[in-house]
Amino acid sequence: MYKLCSLLFETTNNYNTNLQTLLKLIKQTSNKSLIVAPEVCLTGFDYDNFEAVIDFAPHAIEEIKKASKNKIIMLTIIEKRGDKVFNFVKVFHNGEVVYERAKAKLFRFGGEEKYFSEGNKEQVAIIEVDGIKIGILICFELRFKEFWIKLEGADVIAVPSWWGVLRTEHFKALTRALAIMNQCFVVASDSLNEECTKISGIINPQGEVSHNGNKPCLSVDYDKKEIALMRRYMDVGIE
């Protein structure tokens, strides 16, 4: 049986320190863990040192690949493709990047469109990794109901985020509603940085919430029967 794990830690100015923190937390999880880390947790949105952010990506990707044996790891990493920069969510499993897509809805209140190109929203879709149907919404994408519909039928929806503290209640309400509406597990991971909500957690298909609190890694059993029971009990047409 898989474990679902939401991570909660602070992103510092030292990218390698952040990577080592991530790798340490991954190492602490058991085999058959599905792990979600905060958005851009390795570098933050360090626009003043953007070339260094981009240069760090290849090294980080190789290190996370090594840590992904018998585990599913999800986070976003900033990369340059051609002359464009994207915020890519990546899914690592058994030493490979098995899926990636660029953030499709940039947070314009934070000026992301000045630095990033937007990904294709048609690529927001359910993927299957080791028998688990997974959907991913990157931070601001959580607000778009068209994506909720696209991810209907997922077993787990991951929400790697860098969510503003002023909108903490929105983050809590939307992640819980997503689990209830799509009758699935939601694994939400936000940053411990000052400007963020400092809230990570896991919501089950009944909408019951477990928050990390002071734990850098929260682990909950993934039981697919919970999904099937909820969808059968409250049949709203989700297969």
Image (spheres, rainbow, N blue to C red):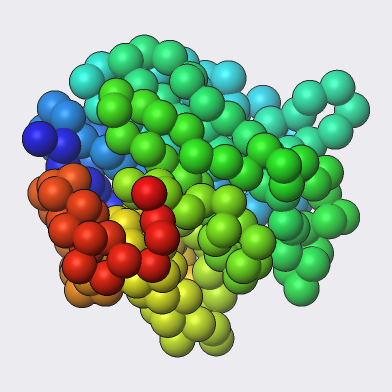
Q: Residue at x 47, y 45 (%)?
A: 135
Position of 46 with respect to 114 (left or right) is left
Residue 232: quarter of image: bottom left
Q: Residue at x 58, y 30 (%)?
A: 100
Position of 57 with respect to 25 (left or right) is right
Position of 224 with respect to 47 (left or right) is left
Residue 216: quarter of image: bottom left
Whether residue 211 appears in this view of the structure is no
- The percent coordinates of residue 105 (x first, y second) are 72, 56
Q: Residue at x 33, y 47 (%)?
A: 155
Q: Is residue 93 above or below residue 165?
A: above
Residue 35: quarter of image: top left
Number of numbered labels in the structure image = 0
- Is the N terminus in the top left, top right, bottom left or bottom right quadrant? top left
- The percent coordinates of residue 165 (x first, y second) are 50, 80
- The percent coordinates of residue 97 (x first, y second) are 48, 20
Q: Residue at x 76, y 73 (%)?
A: 109
Name the foreground residue: 206 vs 222.
206
Q: Is residue 74 above or below residue 202?
A: above
Position of 1 with respect to 238 (left or right) is left
Whether residue 181 appears in this view of the structure is yes
Q: Is residue 231 above or below residue 67?
A: below
